[in-house]
Amino acid sequence: MSKLNARRICYIALLAAMYYVLNLLEIRTPGNLHVTFDALPVMVSALLVGPLDAALVAFFGELLNQIISPYGITATTLLWVMPPVIYAVIIGLTAKRQGKGTLECRPAACYVVCILAALVRTTANTAVIWLDSVIYGYYSFALVFGAAAIRFVTGIVAAVLVATVAMPLVKLLRRQNFMK
């Protein structure tokens, strides 16, 4: 898919909207942490099409999430969009490097890539929390780094759950010629 056509735009918009909806369906944990399945459309796009489309799905999905959230558009909105985009690029580049249809057919490799991407995403989120807290003057070591271990664990759990759903879903979509 080298050119931007109507089908591709609709595909990206649909998955970005799914990202937003799945972000709303969150599981809250102690310490104001949450587990969401917003990474599912990003991972499906990364495995099915590649890093560019996955990055666009993550960018527009998280941008929509940021704009509609109680915080709205702020000076750090684009910073908050970057961790999901990084996640998308890591999985998309790895899937592209493996060859079409091979990463989802190798569950162990897929889980490893998804967990590593989740760890990078969580690290980036922690950096954004730190930067946001410094910019807006609410920095506290306990706030930024106190729950980091829990954030990493919830990120890993979410990555495993999302990968478990994404692999058979992508296989099904490939069989149905979803993306020609």
Image (cartoon, rainbow, N blue to C red):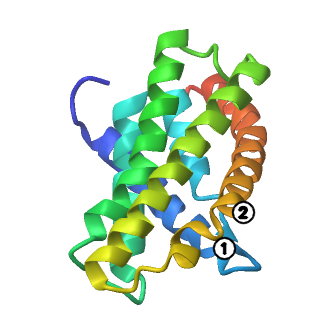
* Count of numbered circles on the image: 2
**Would residue 179 be visible to someone looking at this image?**
no
Q: CA distance from mark 2 to mark 1?
A: 8 Å
SS state under label 1: strand
The earlier-in-sequence mark between 2 and 1 is: 1
For residue 68, side relative to residue 98 (left or right): left
Could you tell me which residue is drawn at 48 percent across and 42 percent down?
Answer: 87
The three-letter amino acid code for the residue at tag 1 is Leu
Circle 1 crowding by C-alpha within 10 Å: few under 14, some 14–19, many from 20: some
Closer to the camera, 179 or 66?
A: 66
Pinpoint residue 27: horizontal percent, then vertical percent.
74, 73
Q: Residue furthest bottom?
A: 70
For residue 99, side relative to residue 160 (left or right): left
Residue denoted by label 2: 150
Could you tell me which residue is drawn at 43 percent across and 27 percent down?
Answer: 50
The three-letter amino acid code for the residue at tag 2 is Ile
Pinpoint residue 167: horizontal percent, then vertical percent.
72, 32
Closer to the camera, 124 or 105?
A: 124
Which label belongs to residue 33?
Answer: 1
Which label belongs to residue 116?
Answer: none
**Would residue 77 be visible to someone looking at this image?**
yes
Could you tell me which residue is drawn at 39 percent across and 86 percent down?
Answer: 138
Q: Are marks 2 and 1 in contact (CB under 8 Å)?
A: yes
